[in-house]
Amino acid sequence: MLNSLKIKILTLVTLIMMLIIGTVAFLNFRHQKEMLHEIANRNTQVLIETIKSSIGNAMLSGHAEEIGSVFARIRTREFVKSLRILDANGKILVSASRNEVGKQVPGFGPEQAPGTKGTLGEDGSFVSFARISNAPACFKCHAAGQDTLGFLEIRLSLDYLQEYIAHERDTAVFSSLLLVTLIFCTIGIFLIVYVDKPIHRLIAFMRDVERGDFEQKIELSSSYEMRTLGESFNRMVQRVKALMQSTVAHERELARAQEKLNHHRETHQMNGRLEEQIREIETLNVTLEERIEEIEEANYKIADLAGELEDKNTNLEKAVAKLSTLYKLGLAINSTIEVESLYHLVVQTTMETLQAQIGYIMLYDAEVGELKVTNLIGTGNDAQLQEARIQMKESGVSTWVIRNGRPLLIADMEQAPEFDRLSVLGYERKTLICAPLQVKDEIIGTLTVVNKQNNSTYNHEELELLSTIAAQASIAIKNAKLYDEQQKTYLNTIQALVSAIEASDSYTRGHSERVTRLSLALARRLDLPQNRLKVIERAAILHDIGKIGIDLSLLHKEEQLTSADVAELQLHPTIGMKILEPIEFLYDVRLCIGQHHERYDGLGYPNNLAAEELLLESRILAIADSFDAMTSDRPYRKALDVEVAIQELSENAGTQFDPELVPIFIDLLMTPNFLPHRVLEAAEA
């Protein structure tokens, strides 16, 4: 606040001084300018009178032509810009510049001719006119009735005066600014010394008093007014101190009295509020009871809605699970055409979906009226009961489903005494679902799930799901069987060709069957999966089919074979691959046949493939084929003893044969009752 007041005072004083000094300077500058103009006007009048005198003398002496020369000389002065004589119509009669003579000055006439006082022209020059009157001395050349002979015009440059005026203006501005600055500084120092410092001290003491320090005394000696203000402040502080002490005493007494009064009043008010609160509590209790009843009703409604929602969620989950199962089953069915794999996949997926403890497929043989168990899962004796045949009887579940051609749901076996509670497969049935595997009007078997994992019972929704699964599985099984029958037809045809070849040669008769038995035994010892067992079985049966393209005389030749004969015989794997090439499902079989004469070290035929490039099945087939060839009679030699053949296998392990498979095959040969009867007799001999 102090700084704001000081700035306001300084600003106000400065503005007033600037206004006063600026006004004085402007009036002084204007007066000087008018004075200079007056001086220029008088000087011009003197010059005009001098020029008129010179003109008159020249006219009297008859030397009028000298007037132009006189004007030219005067024009040489730097302050004279123009000098000429005009007639009453503005025509230039005489001029310091000869080229102006005879020209017309626009807008000039006797009525516009100015007076004797000069004026400022548009170009900033000082212009003055003087009338040249007709006198008796001029009557010789001019008529006596003519009052005015012309007008003398003179233009003087005021540049020298302008410089003087600008100098005076700058001096006045500088003097004014200097004066304002001095006044501002003087007033500022005065305010700081005589006003600002004392007021700062007074404010500091006031703050101390505000904080409760009433012992402060201030002494201000800068001026009489400040000293009086300080003494008044000290007296005021003492009075305030006395008043504060008195007020505090009265406040204490008043506080004690007020405290007593407030206590009584609070007690009375508390009693009143307590009564009001009791009434409010009673009202709230009534309202609360009503709200509780409403909440209970709402809870009942929420419970009903929750139950409905839970039922809908359960139904939705079941529907999603049903669709998911059907989708997975459809993908799985489309991904395999192997009948056995398809059986297992259908049973496994159905058991997982319906949470069954036991599941199986019963295949129906209509010709003999029997049921064959396949892919039984969950009884504990699954392996022993696979492929078991069961006679159809009236108390059998599968029998009822096949004869009636529709699915059967038994939620509780105790409620169905017409069916056996104990299955012929050796387990107790509590709840089950059985659906027919049916294609059009032909029933090919049944799909059954027994006993739920959580010991609950099956319902109609699960019956519908199993029926849908059975319908999809029926079509897939029928297609797989057709495909399997087609494959068997192909294989039987080709095997007939192989048998025809072997039948023409007593030495190789039964060779394919023995190689098949040996290869499958070694493959099972290696725990190969079912699909790879099928590959090696087919490859073993068909491995010599390429001999169809070899000359029979060469196959029966008893003499020593020439290199050309050997080369022709080595073509039979390639010929066999070409024969089987059109049959797409025998692709792996074809590769195995093409490799069964390759060697482990890469020196075999027809493509010199090494171990890492050979199928495992072709390495198995090579061992079995070589062993049977060594232990069989050939046109060019007798059969070798089993011990000799085993020795040959051991010696060529790592070169011709896989070194990891040979020991396993030899161990297999040593198994009792494994070797064919003919080989066993040879071994005993």
Image (cartoon, rainbow, N blue to C red):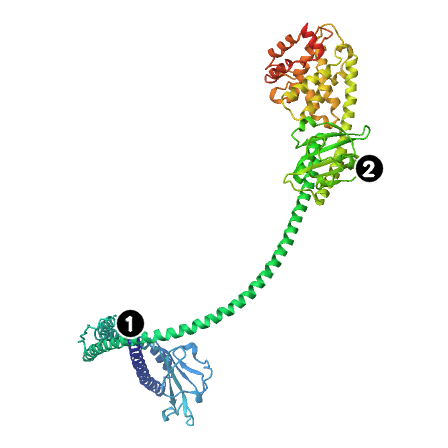
Horizontal side of residue 257 vs 87, given as left or right: left
Q: Is residue 107 left or right of residue 519?
A: left
Image position of 640 (left or right of 215) = right
Q: In the rendered view of the protein, which quadrant contains the C terminus?
A: top right
Numbered disc in front, either 2 or 1: 2
Q: Nearer the viewer, residue 68 or 655?
A: 655
Q: Tag 1 or tag 2, which sits nearer the N-term? A: 1
Q: Please give the residue where the numbered disc 1 appears in the rendered image.
A: 3
Q: Position of residue 213 (x, y in %)?
A: 22, 71
What residue is drawn where x is 55% and y is 65%?
289
Q: Amino acid at mark 2?
A: Asp
Residue reaching furthest to the bottom: 145
Please state which of residues 320 and 577 is positioned toward the viewer in this rendering. Answer: 320
Residue corresponding to mark 2: 441
Query: Observer-nearest residue: 49 or 138?
Result: 49
Mark 2 neighbour class, 10 Å CA radius: few under 14, some 14 to 19, many 20 or more: few
Q: Residue 555: give its label.
A: none
SS label for mark 2: loop
Amino acid type at circle 1 is: Asn
Location of residue 296 by image quarter = bottom right
Q: Where is 296 relative to 56, above or below? A: above
CB under 8 Å between callouts 2 and 1?
Answer: no
**Residue 437 in sight here:** yes
Q: Is residue 83 above or below residue 362?
A: below
Question: Which image quadrant is residue 180 in?
Answer: bottom left
Q: Secondary structure at mark 1?
A: helix
| Image position, residue 111 (x, y; %) | 44, 89
Image quarter of the N terminus: bottom left
Q: Is residue 335 visible?
A: no
Q: Position of residue 393 (x, y in %)?
A: 78, 32
Q: Position of residue 105 (x, y in %)?
A: 45, 82
